[in-house]
Every structure is written in C-alpha cells, then in structure tokens.
Amino acid sequence: MKTRWTQANAANDRQFVIPALICGVPLAMPFAAHARQYRGTITGSVTDLAGAAIAGTAVTAQNTVTNTTYNAITSKQGVYSFPHLPVGVYEIHVKQGSFREFLAKGAEVHISTPNGSQRQA
C-alpha cells in the first residue's frame, strides 16, 4: 500500500482538525470512565446437609468497609452470583425459611486472583 502526503493550506487543516476533535472526544470518554474500575465476582452454591441444592435462597453480599449490600437469589441448582462487585472484603449472608442463617466472613474480591481460585466456606 502506498501513502502519499500532500501539503495542505492552513484553512483546510483547520476544517479537518475541528470535526476530528469533536468526534474523537465522545468516543474516548467511555473508555476513560471505565479505565480504573476494578471489579470481580463472588459465586457460590447453597446446599443442605445431604448435598441437595436449595433453590430460591436469599443471599446477600455486604462490603465490610462501605456497608454496601448486594442481593441475589439462588437458581434451581442452588447457585448464586454477584457479578461486577467493587474490590473489597465481603460478608456473605445466606437465609432460607426455617434454616439457620449462614454467615461467611472474609470473602475477598481483588484483581490478583487467577480465574478458578476458590475458597470453601
């Protein structure tokens, strides 16, 4: 591929630069806004003592520093997920009907854990 450069006059340069700046700024803004948002996921499953999945269980993840809470309900397979959580340490509260509430402390969301790393509660 050949590229040919030509000398343009100053008026033509200005006409090109202004639309390029106007079009380029809105495209760059979404990338800059998301550049430093580090997030992770907490996923788990809820089962009874026999290992059977418990569907419809209320699960809450609470950030221990900000006290922000996130809610989820287990699927038919007893699985819950909190996607896109901000980096931090969480307490996971699990409550279903007459079952005693379960609390898991110290669930960490950070960016240095490889995929597949798990902690059993």
Image (spheres, helix red, strand yellow):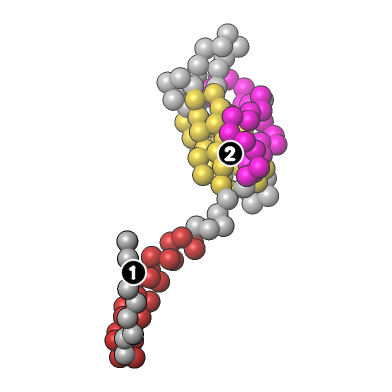
Crowding at mark 2 (Cα within 10 Å: few <14, some 14-19, many 20+): many
Q: Which mark is residue 50?
A: none
Q: Residues within 10 Å of mark 1 (few under 14, many from 20)?
A: few
Q: Name the quadrant of the N terminus.
A: bottom left
Which residue, given by chain and number where applicable, does mark 1 sit on? 3
Tell me the magenta residue range: 94-120
Q: Residue at x 59, y 29 (%)?
A: 116
The secondary structure making up most of the magenta span is loop
Q: Residue at point 32% right, 81% down?
A: 6
Viewer-closest of 105 and 83: 83
Residue 61: mark in rendering? 2
Q: Secondary structure at mark 2?
A: strand
Q: Amino acid at mark 2?
A: Ala
Residue 22 visible to an observer of this rendering: no
- Tell me where residue 64 appears, x and y as whole percent: 67, 45
- Residue 96 colored magenta? yes
Location of residue 74 with respect to 2 vertically, above or below:
above
